Amino acid sequence: MKDRKMERVFKPKLFSVIGKDYFKTQFTKDLFSGIIVGIVALPLAIAFAVASGVSPDKGLVTAVVAGFIISFLGGSRVQIGGPTGAFIVIVYGIIEQYGVDGLIIATVLAGLILIGFGLLRLGTLLKFIPYPLVVGFTSGIALVIFSTQIKDALGLNIDKVPSAFIAKWSVYFSSLDTINPAAVIITLATILISVYFKRITTKIPGSFVAIILVTVVVAVLKIPVTTIESFFGEIPSNFSVSVPHIDQIGFYIAPALTIALLGGIESLLSAVVADGMIGGNHRSNTELIAQGIANVVTPFFGGIPATGAIARTATNVKNGGRTPVAGMIHALTLLLIMLFFGKWAKLIPMSCLAGILIVVSYNMSEWRNFVSILKAPFFDRAILLTTFLLTVLVDLTVAIEVGVVMASFLFMKRMSDAAQKVEFEVDSDLVEQYPDIPKEISIYEISGPFFFASAKEYSAVIKQLGLRSKVMIIRMRHVPFIDSTGLNNLKDTIKTLQNFNVKVVLSGVRKEVYADLERCGVDKLIGKENILPSFDLALDRAKGLIG
């Protein structure tokens, strides 16, 4: 029995979801979805590599090799792996300090760390990462990415851009007299096409159309702007194996931990988002092991760190992909493009890539969530702003470490404050006093704070129970407070249940908790009439909803 459980925990999803009827029912959908995602990934892989300080082919190699491995061995049905914007800042900094060999060593070490995390079943550690912290460092990374693209976006004549945020902008302002109008026009055109082409069709990504159109126009009209060729030279369209010179491993532990932590967090967040879209459950430890193997293997082919990509994963789901085969086809699509069309990538203008990355940074910024948390209680605001400022002005690793420590101390403070209030006037009835509950109604009671350490577990159970019923009653009489992580998880869970036509009713919500639910929009999501002060009223409402 124990061996079967172990097998289920670590078994790749590919070998669990491919049945005998697969080619009749799902293969065609996975095929087309994989091709579309491959096209979506093309400009992003090139742009992420260039922004990271490496040649474009390294981004394509990463998307091909790591993308295939992550889908083949991963614990998610629909996860798409490859280079992501979150790694730009880290990779650029590692190359600047340790060189390309240092990046290879750090990435391999990060892969081994991720494999260790998976084997030790540490995938559930994601629940200890507070939502304000995630939004804080994600928004910070987005701002840093945006700041790295100003030189190419404006065509500024700068020999070397400083790595420090404030120093970088100081150099930009002092070089404004060197702006290239052609580069500015190309950047703006790229942004407009990337953003608005979806009004024509959603089947072909705007960034792909932008990169093709802009490159052709620049090449035909011979517009004087910097291109990949003038910056990097020729782009190889084949694979080569490289082994780095290794001196002292100890130098690379810190950057390796940063890559592993960020890669693990981002891949599992992406898998959780995908679960909500398809109503599935990923195997977090299997996913970490797959991410680790991908990051061990890819650097030897010249690749950079890889992880699960939320935007590409969502694209896969929206286009019908439902098994890891779609992710493998995405990698093969990119391989064919690289082998047969890669040589033309050298003509892409740097300002075009800057435009694509500016759109990426905007999408990464999560500014709506950022603003929402700014209206949250002091504790969440403190974590958000501290993490954001440390990410931008100091270092991502420091930001995560300080954010987690702050979250722990602030949680203890909130628990202390809640214990002093001790108010239990509402919803004191017991479930046992209500016999003959219809089988269409599921009930789950949350006992204790709905915060970052418990939110994922509560949400998983609520979803599991709710999907078996028509109405889900969530009792919250013993919830003294709910933080931003809890609110975010609760909203995502309610949306998932609603996608499967399951109604949600909340019972015994305290005044303070109700105020947070209202601020976050949960009351509008389920309807104020479905948030009731006691269980008997909630049960009557639930019975009315099932008719």
Image (cartoon, grey):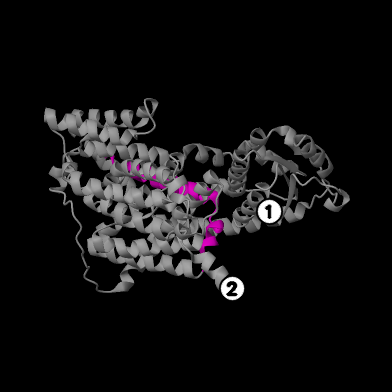
Question: Residue 2 has which mark?
Answer: 2
Q: Quadrant of the N terminus?
A: bottom right
Q: Is residue 487 visible?
A: yes
> Label 1: which residue?
449
Question: In terms of sequence position, does the residue under pointer 2 or pointer 1 come before the other?
Answer: 2
Vertically, is 218 above or below 120? above
Q: Residue at x 32, y 51 (%)?
A: 331
Q: Position of residue 399 (x, y in %)?
A: 45, 55
Q: Amino acid at mark 1?
A: Pro
Tell me if mark 1 has few (under 14), some (14-19) or many (20+) residues whose alpha carbon lies within 10 angstroms of its own. Answer: many
Question: Residue 160 has which mark?
Answer: none
- Residue reaching furthest to the right: 433
Magenta-highlighted residues = 121-150
Q: Quadrant of residue 66?
A: bottom left
Q: Residue at x 55, y 73 (%)?
A: 3
- Specify the principal SS of the magenta part: helix
Q: Position of residue 400 (x, y in %)?
A: 46, 56
Q: Secondary structure at mark 1?
A: loop
Tell me if mark 2 has few (under 14), some (14-19) or many (20+) residues whose alpha carbon lies within 10 angstroms of its own. Answer: few
- Residue reaching furthest to the top: 200
Q: Is residue 137 magenta?
A: yes
Q: Position of residue 156 (x, y in %)?
A: 20, 37
